[in-house]
Amino acid sequence: MRLSVLVGLSWIVMVGLVGCGKLKYDRTETLQPGDMKTYTIDGPSSQQVVRVKLKADEEVSVAVIPARDFPTPFSLENLEKVKAYATKANAKEFDLEATIPAKVDFMVLVYGAKKSTPITLNIQGK
């Protein structure tokens, strides 16, 4: 099964860490069937534990992966080959923790909706 990636990956969001501050990112939007939302986060200056929380009205899947390993061309089969920091499939609510190495940009992928569903995403550094 192939997911359509939005034209020009218009949903990529770059979030940077400011100085020694901790990462904090909140987003609410709608995920359509067959679409994927990608959030690219600048790597922390030192190893950091990141907590990813998500709520949706319908079941979705989430993966936290190194940005450099984003599979091209994108497919679920290619995504399964990537060594993810954290992943969870087919749930309406997630609370994941991932250890991100120093200076490694990472991505949070939200995909797999069977119906249009609002999602609320929260990404925080610990």
Image (cartoon, helix red, strand yellow):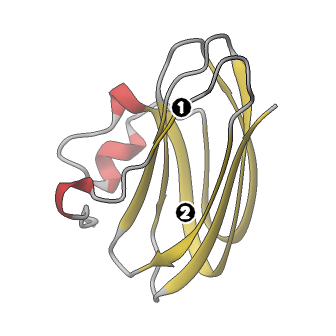
Secondary structure, mark 1, is loop
Q: Are marks 2 and 1 in contact (CB under 8 Å)?
A: no
- Left or right for 46, reference 115: right
Q: What label does residue 126 carry, if any?
A: none
Q: Is residue 111 left or right of residue 27?
A: left
State whether residue 33 is above or below residue 110: below
Determine the image quadrant of residue 32.
bottom left
22 left or right of 102? right
Residue 38 percent coordinates (x, y): 41, 53
Residue 75 screen position, x and y as percent: 27, 54
Which residue in the structure is indicated by mark 1? 16
Task: Classify mark 1: residues with Cα within 10 Å, few (<14), some (14-19) or many (20+).
Answer: some
> Which residue type does callout 2 highlight?
Ser
**Looking at the image, residue 35 lies above or below residue 46:** below
Residue 59, percent across and down?
A: 60, 77
The residue at 57%/81% (across/down) is 118
Q: Which residue is mark 2?
A: 61
Where's residue 111, x and y in %? Answer: 45, 65
Image position of 49 with respect to 111: above or below: above
Binning the other alpha carbons within 10 Å of mark 2 as few (below 14), some (14 to 19) or many (20 upward) gives some
Residue 48, quarter of the rendered image: top right
Q: Where, quadrant-wise, is the C terminus in this rendering?
A: top right
Towards the viewer: 63 or 8? 8
The N terminus sits in image quarter:
bottom left
Depth check, mark 2 against mark 1: the one in front is: 1
Who's the residue at 69% across and 35% down the image? 23
Q: Disc 2 or 1, which lies upstream in sequence? A: 1
